[in-house]
Image: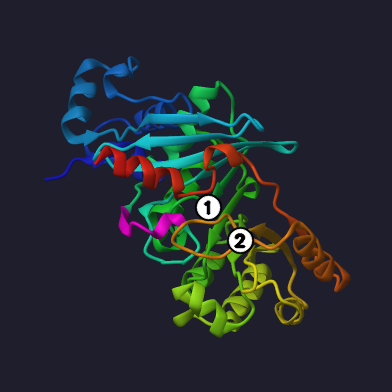
Amino acid sequence: MDRIELNSLTFDELEDFIVSINEDRYRADQLFTFFHKNYGKAIKDLTVFPIRLRDKLDGMGKVNNIEIFKRLDSNIDNTKKYLYLLEDDNIVESVFMEYKHGLTACISTQVGCKMGCYFCASTKDGFVRNLSPAEMLNQVYVMEEDLNNKITNIVLMGSGEPLDNYENVLKFLEIIHHERGHNLSYRNITLSTCGIVPNIYKLAEEGIPITLSISLHSPFDEERRRIMPIGNKYSVSEILQACRYYYEKINRRITIEYTLIEGVNDREEDLLELTKILKGIKCHVNLIPLNPIKEFDYNRPSQLGIKKFKKGLNNKSIPATIRREMGGDINASCGQLRRRYSKDKR
């Protein structure tokens, strides 16, 4: 029988577990704080527990840990790219970014990705498995320990599709927010999805006030299907209707991620259609110049073209910004570095 992963349990689940093994309920509080506030990694180090209880927990449960496989530091800005080695020898990556509004961790939710977006490096080696809540949490905790600093913002925008790992992501959110742990505000968390419509509605019903970010990348269904296979399942109109519902429930402005690809989605007709379909939606468009990969033989538009697209949106009263590129000298875009080191490792 598999041992339970103790640092993947929510506070309530941990209380239920402690009570179920005939221990005092307050031990759950101590154990949760040990993992999620004090960076605890091994039960043997929890010296407020008697040896008897430590031995008991070691026999019934386990603690999932990750370690830094490699860290790359940008010479351009203070961006840092982390490759983490998981217990099964898989590798995932996270990015640390420093902004005026705080310190941000971009974390992965899966090993690989099954969504198959043609311009994204994360999906090129296929899907391996979901990450557990502890594996997501530890990307943040290990980064904080390494930097000796607290992360103030989290984006679930690394490798993987968060809404394809729905239950584990929900647990991650609950744990990172809990007052006995990191106590991070939900409003400081962004979840990015390529548009799994049923789970957008489910997430809205949870009532968690995180920011929803939609990877749209084309206003036309036919073009979107060419670059994002998820478009074969959910139309642009279905996704935007789910966004409207999310805003009604959560009252948080939606972010629209739009990767600009020369000759594919940066044309005048794309701009006109995008302004048309976003009219009336409380949103902000984040324009992302394409980060070329060898498997996707397209280029980013010129700087002039990018600025023109942004101005066209702004002129139609749609807030839009061009994403500031971070860590360009260390392959800070998700997926690229992991692929290279995974191949080297094999």
Q: Is residue 19 visible?
A: no
Residue 79 lies within the magenta run:
no
Left or right for 176, reference 264: left
Q: Which one is nearer the viewer's eye here, 284 or 289?
A: 289
Tell me which residue sits at (37%, 64%) in the image. Answer: 114
Q: Secondary structure at mark 1?
A: loop
Q: Which residue is mark 2?
A: 213
Residue 54 lies, with reference to residue 274, above or below; the image says: above
**Dot 1 or dot 2, earlier in sequence:** 1
Q: Position of residue 181 (x, y in %)?
A: 50, 33
Span highlighted in magenta in the image: 121-129
Tell me which residue sits at (38%, 44%) in the image. Answer: 340
Check whether the beta carbons of the residues at disc 1 and disc 2 lie within 8 A of each other: yes
Marks 1 and 2 sit apart, C-alpha to C-alpha, by 9 Å
Residue 100 lies, with reference to residue 244, above or below; the image says: above
Residue 126 lies within the magenta run:
yes
Q: Which residue is mark 1?
A: 157
Left or right for 345, reference 297: left
Amino acid under label 2? Answer: Ser
Identify the image quadrant of the N terminus: top left
